[in-house]
């Protein structure tokens, strides 16, 4: 099939296509579907394989069912990788040698493609005595730094950097340091952070009581619950982390609570797991199942949804039997409980097709109906598989009394009572960043549409860029049906126009029908007041959510994609590309230790009548300077393009001294060439002593400063959703 857009084609080619040197691989995306279907059908009885393979391939066709990226990339390739996306590692002992043994286990898991989550609450707090060596403990965060450094060195599955989740209980004595950890923009960058919050803390918070800080039963301090919560919300407001996991609720509602205790979460928060727990993921593309989109009778094809759910359950169940596992403990855990994570993507687009605005009452109602259908059919499919292949080894009939099963309809409960279940847990809603792009840029998971249209910059072999438009799937379908007619603003809502309350309502509506949890980010505007923001996690708690995370553009993590205020649905975001010409100045620096002068060019843009620096170029004929001048050019330009007060750049450079000695320039002692460049930047920002070489004044597109920079392409189209960074320009994505 031809892809709906060039970005989808590129993602398939670079991430999911099996293209081995000197051997046959995937010639088309149909070849990828065929490879995956054949690999998963290998778990079937030989007599059934041809029919099951055809059934699996039909489910994959037209991107109706999207197995997670590890399955698409690895199934049927014979690569030494796992097909499971996420793991929670074992309980970390409070012992130095055992801690480093767990670092090794995490490294092996990351190397084979699995994201990992850990609870660091079992490590004694900083300053606690270490018996036998007459020393004080360094605390859990010091060991998290070790994990972080390890993760930086691991290229996960040969394709992407590893993702990790670090958790700490809110009663751990080091909780305040943990809460503030991400205020340091350079620390724990390979971690997402979540605070494990028990019911007892929420009770103390409601009573405005003191909260004890405890390690191994010993009270080591206390803090006002409200003060601790305010500190948590302030950190989240300022740095977008940590998130929260309502750990008692998670365990109380866990299907397998009779045989396990949930320890932590996977990196994106949708899968809470016990020690060495593993989960494989896949998503039903709701956007492909709406009959007659944009017409009066538009509706979800429930029969197709039901049939696809049953096939998806069988496919994911088979993955357990054909996948590799990084650790034997993970294999034993997965096969004992046969946990799967079936979810959805394209929810927002499906609502748009039905003429329904995301976040409204009707959207909440339809979300509940659609996910209730998936839940019912998933449990029925698992019960039928149990009759055919056997129940999961740790099955206990008492599972019928667990909350997720107690709410099932009588017919489904009767089927389970008769046959048992093949799978201990069935549903979870994961992030679908690149797989949703692969499917034609459908809306991701249960998130709203972030932007209906944007411009993607594609790097060319010569280093230049070309621009190509990218559209959300719903907008592309609208244009095919209605041409240039403006789509209805009432239903084409986006993350830019929704309130935090809209986000929470939709997450809660989905959570009511999901076994595990949901990867969902409550995106907030940069100018939201702290008073309004501070209640978001409480609202999630009261609404029945199991975990919460937010994202507000901020000085530490940067901002999301720049868009016009309240954009119309047909307009899309307005980026701030580099104009063809910029007005600037070039300064000549003569440094005594260099045979050639250094030329510093600073170019400006004008926004709202105010000029600000946009880029810098540092050039010299002295090739000894090449590497560091190129590095400074890229780094300082990235800082300039983010906007805001950039005066600190000059101050930092002016403070650099050269141990070989500085030089006198213009009657002043300058401690280094870098300091001299800092002085040039300072002069330019102040408009003093300029000798510019001027270009024609260009017409500059207005944009919002504070953009996040993509680490792959250097562009400023990095957005945050579902706990992951995703670049709208090049398709880069990273969780953690």
Image (cartoon, grey):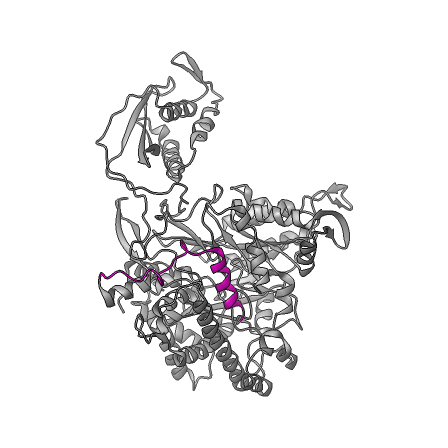
Is residue 302 something that shows in the picture? yes
Relative vertical location of residue 558 with respect to residue 415 in this rendering, above or below: above
In front here: 15 or 718?
718
Q: Residue drawn at (26%, 60%), measured in percent from left and top?
A: 486
Q: In which quarter of the image is residue 48?
A: bottom left
Question: Farthest residue in the top direction?
Answer: 667
Q: Residue 285, how many percent across, how many down?
A: 39, 70
Is residue 3 something that shows in the picture? no
Q: Quadrant of the N terminus?
A: bottom left
Relative vertical location of residue 641 with respect to residue 399 in this rendering, above or below: above
Q: Residue 456, how many percent across, how many down?
A: 30, 51
Q: Residue drawn at (40%, 77%), measured in percent from left and top?
A: 56
Relative vertical location of residue 732 with respect to residue 41 in this rendering, above or below: above
In front here: 113 or 535?
535
Is 135 contained in the magenta span? no
Is 504 contained in the magenta span? yes
Q: Quadrant of residue 473?
A: bottom left
Relative vertical location of residue 275 with respect to residue 133 in this rendering, above or below: below
Q: Residue 612, how many percent across, how many down?
A: 35, 33
Count of number-bearing discs: 0
Q: In which quarter of the image is residue 624?
A: top left
Q: What stretch is highlighted in magenta?
A: 484-512
Q: Residue 462, how many percent across, how many down?
A: 25, 44
From the viewer's perspective, is 64 left or right of 241? left
In front here: 593 or 348?
348
């Amino acid at each position: 099939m031809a892809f709906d857009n060039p970005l989808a084609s590129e993602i398939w080619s670079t991430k999911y296509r099996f293209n081995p040197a000197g051997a046959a691989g995937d010639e088309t995306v149909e070849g990828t579907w065929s490879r995956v279907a054949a690999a998963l059908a290998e778990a079937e009885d030989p007599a059934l394989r041809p029919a099951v393979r055809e059934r699996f391939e039909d489910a994959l066709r037209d991107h109706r069912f999207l197995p997670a990226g590890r399955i698409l990339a690895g199934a049927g390739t014979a690569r030494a990788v796992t097909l499971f996306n996420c793991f929670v590692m074992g309980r970390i002992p409070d012992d130095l040698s055992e801690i480093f043994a767990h670092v090794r286990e995490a490294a092996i898991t990351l190397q084979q493609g699995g994201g990992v989550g850990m609870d660091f609450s079992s490590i004694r707090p900083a300053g606690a005595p270490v018996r036998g060596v007459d020393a004080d403990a360094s605390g859990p965060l010091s060991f998290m730094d070790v994990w972080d450094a390890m993760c930086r060195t691991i290229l996960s599955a040969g394709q992407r950097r590893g993702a990790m989740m670090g958790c700490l209980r809110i009663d751990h004595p080091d909780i305040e340091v943990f809460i503030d950890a991400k205020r340091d923009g350079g620390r724990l960058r390979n971690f997402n952070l979540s605070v494990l919050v028990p019911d007892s803390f929420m009770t103390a918070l409601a009573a405005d009581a003191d909260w004890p800080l405890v390690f191994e039963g010993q009270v080591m301090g206390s803090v006002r619950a409200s003060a601790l919560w305010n500190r948590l919300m302030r950190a989240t407001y300022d740095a977008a982390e940590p998130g929260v996991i309502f750990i008692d609720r998670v365990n109380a509602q866990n299907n397998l609570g009779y045989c396990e205790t949930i320890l932590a979460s996977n990196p994106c928060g949708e899968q809470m797991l016990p020690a060495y727990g593993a989960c494989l993921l896949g998503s039903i593309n709701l956007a492909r199942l709406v009959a007659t989109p944009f017409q009066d009778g538009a509706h979800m094809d429930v029969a197709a949804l039901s049939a696809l759910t049953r096939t998806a359950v069988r496919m994911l169940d088979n993955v357990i039997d054909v996948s590799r596992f990084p650790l034997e403990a993970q294999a034993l855990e997965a096969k004992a409980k046969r946990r799967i994570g079936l979810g959805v993507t394209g929810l927002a687009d499906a609502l748009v097709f039905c003429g329904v605005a995301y976040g409204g009452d009707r959207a909440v109602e339809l979300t509940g109906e659609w996910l209730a259908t998936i839940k019912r059919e998933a449990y029925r499919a698992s019960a039928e598989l149990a009759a055919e292949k056997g129940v999961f080894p740790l099955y206990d009939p008492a599972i019928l009394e667990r909350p997720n099963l107690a709410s099932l309809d009588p017919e489904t409960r009767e089927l389970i009572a008769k046959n048992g279940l093949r799978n201990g847990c069935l549903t979870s809603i994961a992030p679908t960043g690149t797989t949703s792009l692969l499917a034609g840029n459908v809306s991701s998971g249960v998130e709203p549409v972030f932007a209906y249209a944007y411009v993607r910059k594609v790097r060319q072999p010569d280093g230049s860029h070309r621009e190509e438009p990218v559209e959300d799937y719903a907008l592309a379908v609208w244009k095919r049906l209605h041409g240039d007619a403006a789509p209805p603003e009432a239903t084409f809502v986006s993350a830019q126009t929704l309130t935090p309350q809209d986000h929470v309502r939709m997450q809660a509506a989905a959570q009511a029908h999901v076994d595990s949890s949901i990867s969902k980010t409550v995106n907030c505007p940069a100018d939201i007041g702290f008073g309004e923001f501070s209640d978001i996690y409480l609202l999630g708690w009261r609404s029945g959510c199991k975990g919460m995370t937010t994202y507000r553009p901020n000085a530490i993590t940067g901002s999301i994609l720049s868009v016009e205020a309240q954009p119309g649905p047909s307009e899309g975001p307005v980026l701030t590309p580099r104009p063809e010409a910029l007005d600037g100045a070039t300064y000549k620096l003569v440094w005594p230790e260099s045979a050639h002068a250094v030329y510093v060019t600073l170019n400006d843009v004008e926004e709202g009548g105010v000029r600000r620096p946009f880029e810098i170029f540092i050039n010299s004929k002295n090739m000894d300077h090449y590497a560091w001048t190129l590095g400074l050019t890229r780094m300082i330009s990235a800082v300039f393009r983010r906007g805001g007060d950039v005066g600190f750049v000059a101050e930092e450079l002016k403070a650099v001294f050269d141990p070989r000695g500085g030089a006198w320039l213009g009657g002043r002692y300058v401690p280094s060439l870098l300091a001299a460049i800092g002085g040039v930047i300072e002069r330019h920002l102040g408009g003093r002593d300029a000798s510019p070489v001027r270009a024609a004044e260009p017409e500059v597109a207005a944009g919002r400063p504070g953009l996040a920079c993509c680490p792959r392409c250097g562009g400023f189209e990095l957005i945050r959703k579902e706990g992951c960074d995703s670049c709208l320009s090049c398709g880069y994505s990273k969780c953690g």
